Amino acid sequence: MEQAKEHNWTVTVADADLPTARKKVAGHPQGKAAWLDVQKVNDRRDLIGRADVVVSLLPPHLHLEVAKDCIQLNKHLITASYVSKSLYLLGDEVRQRDLIFMGEMGLDPGIDHMSAMQKIHAIHEQGGRLTAFRSYTGGLVAPESDDNPWHYKISWNPRNVVLAGQGTAQYLQDGKLKYIPYNRIFQSYRHIEVPGLGKYEVYPNRDSLLYREAYGLEGIPNILRGTIRAPGFCDAWDALVRIGLTDNSYPIVDSESLTYHELVEAYLSPKIKSGSVRDRVAQFLGEDAESEVMHKLDWLGLFSKKKIALPSATPAVILEDLLLRKWKLRPDDKDMVIMQHEFEYELKGEHQLLVSSMILKGEDAVHTAMSKLVGLPIGIFVKLVMLGKIRSTGLQIPVRKEVYQPVLTELRNYGVEFVETSPQPS
Amino acid sequence: MEQAKEHNWTVTVADADLPTARKKVAGHPQGKAAWLDVQKVNDRRDLIGRADVVVSLLPPHLHLEVAKDCIQLNKHLITASYVSKSLYLLGDEVRQRDLIFMGEMGLDPGIDHMSAMQKIHAIHEQGGRLTAFRSYTGGLVAPESDDNPWHYKISWNPRNVVLAGQGTAQYLQDGKLKYIPYNRIFQSYRHIEVPGLGKYEVYPNRDSLLYREAYGLEGIPNILRGTIRAPGFCDAWDALVRIGLTDNSYPIVDSESLTYHELVEAYLSPKIKSGSVRDRVAQFLGEDAESEVMHKLDWLGLFSKKKIALPSATPAVILEDLLLRKWKLRPDDKDMVIMQHEFEYELKGEHQLLVSSMILKGEDAVHTAMSKLVGLPIGIFVKLVMLGKIRSTGLQIPVRKEVYQPVLTELRNYGVEFVETSPQPS
C-alpha cells in the first residue's frame, strides 16, 4: 500500500466476504475493497477489466478461469501457485498478446527459484560447471518460540503438513535416478548445518526433477529438493506414517466416539498381544519406552483417553485436527523460514561447494515470516510490471535475470537476505 | 450349452470381436455368436431386447448402462462383479418391475457368499451364536504343477495380483475394529491349515466388514476376510512392497532402457553405500543373503542385467510384465482354488469351531479351476431363473437360501464341494 501511495496506484482487494476484504484494506486511501463471487463470470470479468495487473490468490484450481479472462481482457496475471498444465497451454496466447503471466512467485515455489537461479547463472558466468544442486526449505518455529518436543509449529496449510511426502520422491544422485516410496521418505532424511542455527534434518520432496530444464541444469548428476525439519522430527513423523495415521483415503468407523487411545490401538498388530497400547506401539516401532520418538507421540496425546469428537474423519483429518491444536502458533510466537541451497561445481579444475542460506523470523502469529515470504515477491513483481520494468512476455516462472535480480534486490529491504558460506566439500 | 440343448434355449455370446464370440460358441447348435460394440446404444438394446436373461461379463464400469437397458426392456441381469453403488441405486426400480438383478455371482465374490451363508443359517437355525467368521480364498497353483519358489502362478487378473492389498485392510477382532495399512498388510498374515494340503498363509483383505449386514452378522465380534497364499509368499511379497515395486502411480523415467538391476538400484537408500545391488537389498530388508526371500527375488530376475523394455511403465506395470512371464501357467499346468471358512460359535454353552473347505484343481491352463468357479455359478443361476425357480426380485447378492441352496447343490455335480472339519478351537 505504501508503494501504491508513492505511485498513486489503487489496490483493489476482492473477496467473497466483503468484511474480510475491508479488513485487509484497513481504510488505506489507496485501497478499495470489493465483494466478488469468483464463480460469477460477469462480476469477475467486470472487476478484472478495471485492473492493470491481476493477482490471483485463489485456490489453485480457480486460476484457470481468471487466466482466460485476463487473456481476453489483456491483463497481466501473477500467482504464487504452481503452474498447472492447463495454465501452461495458455502460454502462446499470453505471449501473442504481449502479456506476462507469472506463476510460482511466492516462497517455495518462488524465492527458491530466484535465489537459486541467481547463483546458478553466476556460477555459469564464471565458467563453473555444476555437479550438484540441492535446495531445501522449511517453515518452522523460531527457537525463542519453540516449546514443544517436535520443535515444530504450523505456519501454513495444515492439510499439507499431514499429507507431506505422500507419493514417491524422485531425485538424482551420481547421475542415477533415485526413487523413495512414501513408506521410506521419513527414514531417508539427511542432516544439514544451517549457519547460525546448527543441525537440521531434510527429507526429499517429490518434485526434485521438475526444474532441471527451467534451471538450465540438464545433465547435472545430482539434484535434490527437500523439506527442512528440526532434528528428531523425521523419525517421529515416520512413526505416525508406519502406524497409519497420515492416511486420508478412508474414514474411521465411529471416529466421533472413539478416543485417541482406541484409534491407535486399532492399528496395532494382533501379533503383539500383551502390554498397554503405548507399550505395544513402542514394541511395534522398535523404540525404547522412553525414547525421543515415544516422548513426541506422548506429547501429541495419542495415548490419551480423550474423545476424537470428529464424525467420519479419516486418520489424516483426525491427525490434522490434533496438530492444529498442539502445533498452534500462540499470538506472540514467531515462526521461522529457512531456505538453503547447496551448489557443488568444478571451476578451473577445483571442486567448489557454496551454501546459500536465508533465515527469516516472523513478528507474531499473524505477521508470519511465511506470509511475508509468500506475499512480498508478488507485491514487488506487481510494482515492476506497473513500472514497465519487465520486458519479457508469456507464461513464466521467475527464473530469468530480468525478474529475479530486481525482486531479490528489493527483498533485501525487507530483511530477506541470502548469506553465502563455503564449507569444505565432504 | 448342454443345459441349453436339454431345454431348447439359445445362448447368444456377444463380443466386440466376432471371431472370439464364434470361438466360444464353438459351433454348438444352441449357440449364436453376435458382434457387439457395447458403446453403441441401439445395437446393445436390440440384442438385450431379444434375450430373456442377460449375463454381463463386461468390465465392471460398463455394467451400469447394461443394467439401465435391462430395466427399460424388462430383462433379468446377472454379473460376477462387485455390486457398485450406482447399481445399488437401481434396486427399487428392479423390484418394481419384478426383475432380478444378481450381482457377485462368481467365486469371490459369489461362492464365498453362498457357502458361508449356508453354514451361517444352519448355525443360527440350531440356535448357535456366532462369535467369529473368517473367510479365505486363494487362486493358486496345484502342487503337481508347482515348480517355483513362490509356489504361485497367475490364474486371474494379473494387474490385481500386483495391486493386491493396496488401501487399508479393516476387520474386527474381539469386538474391536482393526486397521492394517498397506505397508503392513503382507507382514500381517496368519497361518491356516487346509485339510489334505497343509499350512498356508492368509493376508487380510480390505473388505472384511462389507458383508456384516448382508450376512446377518451385525454385532459379531470377529470377522475377517483374507487371501490364501503358499507359506513364504507374504514375506517375499512384502519385500517387493518395501522396495517400492508395486506402486502404480508414476512412470519410471527411461524404463525402456533400464535393466531390472538398475531399477532395483534406483530404490536403494543412499545410506547403504557398499556392496552389490543384491547385497544392499538384503541389507535393507534385513535378510540373510541366502534367505528364502532373497532366493525368491533372485528367481524373479530382479537382479538381472536384462532390459525392462517397456516404455513409460510404472513399477507395478514392470512387475506385472515380469510376473506374467515367471508365473505363467504352462499349457498342462493345473491351477488350484482353495476356499476356507472358519465359524466359531456358542451352542448350548459350548464353544464350537467349524472349518469348511473347498479345493478345486483345474484341468490345464485353459480349463482352469478359476474360470470354472467364476463361470459355473452364473450358468447355474441363469438356468434357475429360466426355469422360474427364483421367486424373489430386486437387486441381490447370493445370500438367500432360495438362491444358494440350489446353486451349491448343482455345483457339487461339477466337483465343487465343501468339506467340514471341527478342529479343537485354539
Image (cartoon, coloured by chain):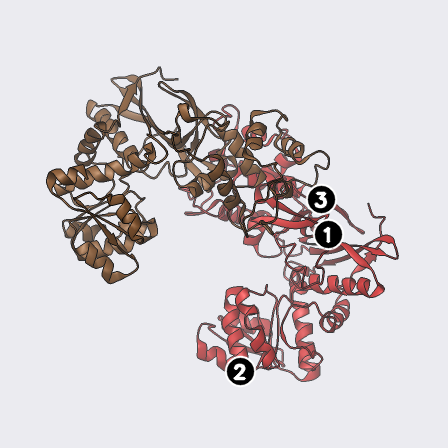
Chain colours: A red, B brown
Instruction: Say what secondary structure mark 3 lies in.
Output: strand
Q: Looking at the picture, does residue A139 appear above or below residue B153?
A: below
- Classify residue A76 by image quadrant: bottom right
Q: Residue at x 73, y 35 (%)?
A: B274
Quadrant housing the C terminus of chain A: top right
Q: Residue at x 20, y 22 (%)?
A: B126
Does any portion of residue B96 appear in the rendered image?
yes
* Left or right, residue A62 beside residue A328: left
Indicate which disc residue A73 carries. Answer: 2
Q: Which residue is mark 3?
A: A190
Q: Position of residue A346 (x, y in %)?
A: 83, 55
The earlier-in-sequence mark between 3 and 1 is 3
**Is disc 3 surrounded by few (<14), some (14 to 19) or many (20+) residues within 10 Å?**
some
The chain under label 3 reads A
Cα–Cα span, label 2 and label 3 = 48 Å
What amino acid does circle 2 point to? Leu
Instruction: Say what secondary structure mark 1 lies in.
Output: loop
**Is disc 1 surrounded by few (<14), some (14 to 19) or many (20+) residues within 10 Å?**
some
Give a yes or no on whether discs 2 and 1 share a subunit. yes
Of the pair A290 and B243, the residue shown nearer to us: B243
Q: Position of residue A290 (x, y in %)?
A: 65, 30
Of the pair A399 and B382, the residue shown nearer to us: B382
Instruction: Say what secondary structure mark 2 lies in.
Output: helix
Cα–Cα span, label 2 and label 1 = 44 Å
Q: Which residue is mark 1?
A: A221
